[in-house]
Image (tube, rainbow, N blue to C red):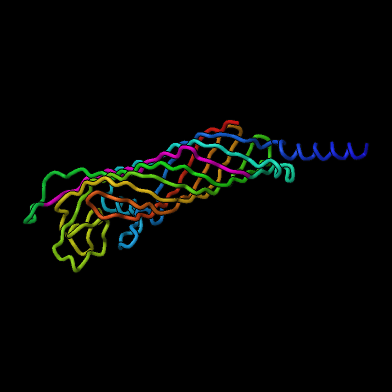
Amino acid sequence: MKKILLVLSTLLFAGSIAFGQGTIKNNSYFNLTWIRPIMDYGTIDGQETPNNLNKYYSERFGSDLKHYSGALNVGANFYIHPISWLIDGFKAGLCVDFIDLGANYYRFKAHQQKAGGIVLDEAETFDDLTVYYSLNVGAIATISPMKGFYIDLTGKACPTFAVNYFKIPAYQTAVTANAPAFERRNTGDEWGGYQLVGNDVLPTTTEEQTGIGWGINYSFGFNLRFYKFSVGCEWLFGNLHYGYEDWDDQTVKNQELKVKIGMTFE
């Protein structure tokens, strides 16, 4: 009889560990995200470019610059049940963003000049658009200090596919031996996007290209959830390698601050 009770007690103990949900349950979520490029965003590996493309565009074009960025995010959290039994109000597990779809778009105006230094009267409109999709997988740790309130800490790996379209001012120089200090995208004797240091002339041509990018980013963040509503913040960093049909390949740093607001469903 004692052996039977011991077996039943062991099964009950194991079942409570394996299936006990506690106050923290598996959930899915939908977020809208505001993106802020930070730190070395847009810096090109192997080229001496300004530290932040967003800051450069803002300082160079001022009120003529329009910048829009954002993303939508759909995913789920899957918790490992035994930890909840061992530590009340705490669970850890896996988080998966099945859809992380976003864009970063710049539009600005700049004057061009023709050969001989003749400045065109009307400014031309330029664009720089990056659209990305990533499938993010990582770890989550959740604390629930009170009923309906949760604090999440997350760390994710973010394999990312991106498309970059740009139509930007380009500077030309015949002295290829003396490369300019700032090079954003270069081919032959042309430099696009960043103004050449020590060169006061206006851009003389326009470059228009579409590139396909790929890379693995990483993110760390937190969420504050109160019942179904949530707010959160993520810091993302990594590199994306872009290939263009007739422009030099670029490995670009991708560092962003993401602020999220959304809904959670159990």
Horizontal relation, residue 133 to residue 119: left or right:
right
Q: Is residue 65 above or below residue 239?
A: above
Q: Position of residue 164 (x, y in %)?
A: 31, 45
Q: Position of residue 48 (x, y in %)?
A: 30, 63
What residue range appears in magenta?
93-113
Q: Quadrant of the N terminus?
A: top right
Q: Residue at x 26, y 55 (%)?
A: 248
Q: Residue at x 43, y 49 (%)?
A: 256
Q: Position of residue 180 (x, y in %)?
A: 22, 64
Magenta stretch: dominant SS? strand
Along the line of sight, the residue nearer the viewer: 47 or 134: 134
Q: Is residue 106 magenta?
A: yes
| Residue 8 falls in image quadrant | top right
Q: Is residue 134 magenta?
A: no
Q: Quadrant of the C terminus?
A: top right
| Residue 184 falls in image quadrant | bottom left
